[in-house]
Amino acid sequence: MPTKADVIALAHRLIGVLSADEVPSADQDAFATDVLDALFEELRYTQGIPIAWTLASTPQRALMGLAETLASEIAPHYGRQYKPRSSGIARLRAALLSDDRTGAMDLGDAVVLTQGQASYFEYALYPTTVDLTGATVVFNMRDEYGTTVIDGASATVVTATGTPKVRYDFTTTNTRNVGRFRGDFQVTFADTTTATFPETPKIPVVITDPMGGSEDPLDALGDYF
């Protein structure tokens, strides 16, 4: 599992202070350690996030959220701009909190992106008996008002059988508007029949303002439930 040093190094890389093959200096490490220790204690008592581990061994699923939150805290020290703190916390909540109400989609299923970000996500199709051999897949997305934002954009089959998985690559044009969205994948099978995954509920997508604008990702995620 990632260590405290891994969280600190990743946070520095996220804000562009270190390259992928560099490690923090003694001063950088000492500063970030103080911030991370205080931040970790704060998160344990103020966000309702179940934290049953120590910084010596952070669960892999919590690494990005914790590193992004730390990056937001230390970025001003280096004169850098980074995502708002709430973005990292939203990612932590998505990784660690589950909504077990009937018909509700878990926070962990939300795709959280930054405005203007070119990124991707992969999605496993159910049931696992679905066979994507020879299939073509497109991705669709609508905003909270039902307006189509992405219509039939080409997607990729990552795994055809076993646990069938598809992937969509977001362009900077796709993520230019901050807000809350819903997406799905439409599959045309080799025999020309079609199906939509998921049918309901759709895949929640949240695009956040990197400068901390009015759309708070925690509020946005909360509006789904």
Image (tube, helix red, strand yellow):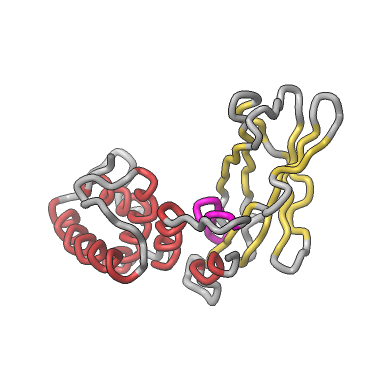
Answer with left or right where residue 76 lies relative to residue 96.
Answer: left
Which region shows up in magenta? 104-115
Residue 43 position (above or below residue 96)? below
Question: What percent of the width, then of the height, locates residue 12?
Answer: 30, 53
Question: What percent of the width, then of the height, locates residue 177?
Answer: 64, 65
Query: For residue 130: magenta?
Result: no
Question: What percent of the width, then of the height, locates residue 135?
Answer: 76, 28
Answer with left or right where residue 14 lies relative to residue 192.
Answer: left
Position of the N terminus, as image quadrant, is top left
Q: Please state which of residues 119 and 216 is positioned toward the viewer in this rendering.
A: 216
Residue at coordinates 23% horizontally, 45% vertically from top-left?
57
Q: Please state which of residues 93 and 128 is positioned toward the viewer in this rendering.
A: 128
Residue 28 position (above or below residue 125)? below
Query: For residue 113: magenta?
Result: yes
Question: What percent of the width, then of the height, locates residue 211?
Answer: 47, 70
Residue at coordinates 28% horizontally, 64% vertically from top-left?
44
Quarter assignment of residue 42: bottom left
Residue at coordinates 79% horizontally, 39% vertically from top-left?
195
